[in-house]
Image: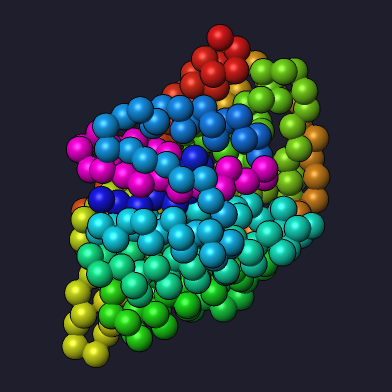
Amino acid sequence: MILVTGAAGFIGFSVARRLLDRGTAVIGLDSLSPYYDPRLKRARLAQLEGRNGFVFHQVDLADRAAAGAVLEQHPEIEGIVHLAAQAGVRHSLTQPFDYVDANVTGHLVVLEACRRLKALKHLVYASTSSVYGANRKLPFSVEDRVEQPVSLYAATKLADEMMTKAYVRLFGFPATALRFFTVYGPWGRPDMSAFLFTRAILAGEPIEVFNGGDMERDFTYIDDIVAGVVAALDRPPAQTGDEPPHRTYNLGNHRRVPLMRFIETIEQACGRKAEIVFKPMQLGDVQATYSDIEASTRDLGYHPTTDIEQGIPNFVAWYREYYEA
Ligand SMILES: NC(=O)c1ccc[n+]([C@@H]2O[C@H](COP(=O)([O-])OP(=O)(O)OC[C@H]3O[C@@H](n4cnc5c(N)ncnc54)[C@H](O)[C@@H]3O)[C@@H](O)[C@H]2O)c1
């Protein structure tokens, strides 16, 4: 029995669906936070509810009494995929406390549960490429030092990694941090570029492009991320010598894609040109992300297979079917 937090979210829903497909029972947990349209979250959940082996609890992880009461009902939990969070770099400039509530308090509630769950074999949790912050060396490697966050979002995710390492050292349960790189695909997040650009282009509205378009992202397709998450879940790290059973991996596509190339690919998939409004670099953003996935490939057998030429048409097809059909 696997607990998936953030099960109504983009990645959590996709992971829960994959686990159910292979016959693994899933407890889904999500607060259905109003950060973006909860109707999309409910529509994702509707795909899971009613399936064999799925139960769902709507609860806010930052409400430790309520979340604790739900988790106590499930002593059979063997694995946790903790994906619930307040995501997004830009929102952290205006709503900073959302990040501390969901990503720090909420994360601690999960760690406390890990400490108590007797059957637990592994905690897998979401971190982010944003932890590399102002680092200039590319590609970003899990061996690199990460102490220059440029957003509160990144700082809370770094805090999650530190808190988890402390709990693993103290209480000995195995845990794996996964640093995701710009995930996109069907059922994706409405605040992210693939979604924002597709929506605007199809509606004939202008798109905002930051830093004059001089940005690069390692765009990673959802199916590759799901494969990486499930591979990680199935491989709890062992204690090796003095090293506690905690590991950190990048899950990216290992490609540097210029933002303007990404936009062209969306234009082609939509069959329309974008009207572009160039804007300066946004506070909290980084110019480039690019993943070193050597460790993930070696230890998890992680091999991303979907480039934007294939992934973007899949996303646009889903978007049109979902919003226009
Ligand atoms: N999508 C990406 O490109 C990306 C990149 C790096 C890291 N991440 C991380 O991956 C994880 C999943 O991201 P996503 O893209 O699926 O985001 P998402 O916003 O679609 O999903 C997160 C889910 O968590 C839920 N949630 C938020 N606060 C909660 C709380 N306090 N208690 C219970 N549920 C709560 C939300 O309702 C939402 O459904 C997050 O931890 C995010 O920070 C995502």
Q: Is residue 167 magenta?
A: no
- Magenta span covers which residues? 10-35
Residue located 62% across and 26% down the image = 198
* Residue 145 as seen in the image, left or right of residue 267: left
Identify the colour scheme used. Answer: rainbow
Q: Is residue 17 magenta?
A: yes
Numbered label tally: 0
| 230 to 155, vertically: above or below | above
Q: Quadrant of the C terminus?
A: top right
Residue 180 on image: x %, y %: 45, 54
Residue 319 on image: x %, y %: 55, 22
Q: 151 or 136, which is in the foreground? A: 151
| 299 to 189, vertically: above or below | below
Q: Quadrant of residue 268?
A: top right
Q: Is residue 137 visible?
A: no
Residue located 35% across and 69% down the image = 114
Residue located 44% across and 52% down the image = 5
Residue located 74% across and 50% down the image = 211
Residue positioned most to the bottom:
242
| 115 to 154, vertically: above or below | below
| 18 to 292, vertically: above or below | above
Q: Is residue 41 visible?
A: yes
* Residue 107 as seen in the image, left or right of residue 102: left
Residue 199 on image: x %, y %: 66, 25
Q: 298 or 54, which is in the foreground? A: 54
Q: 137 or 198, which is in the foreground? A: 198
Q: Quadrant of residue 113?
A: bottom left
Residue positioned most to the top:
325
Residue 37 on image: x %, y %: 65, 34
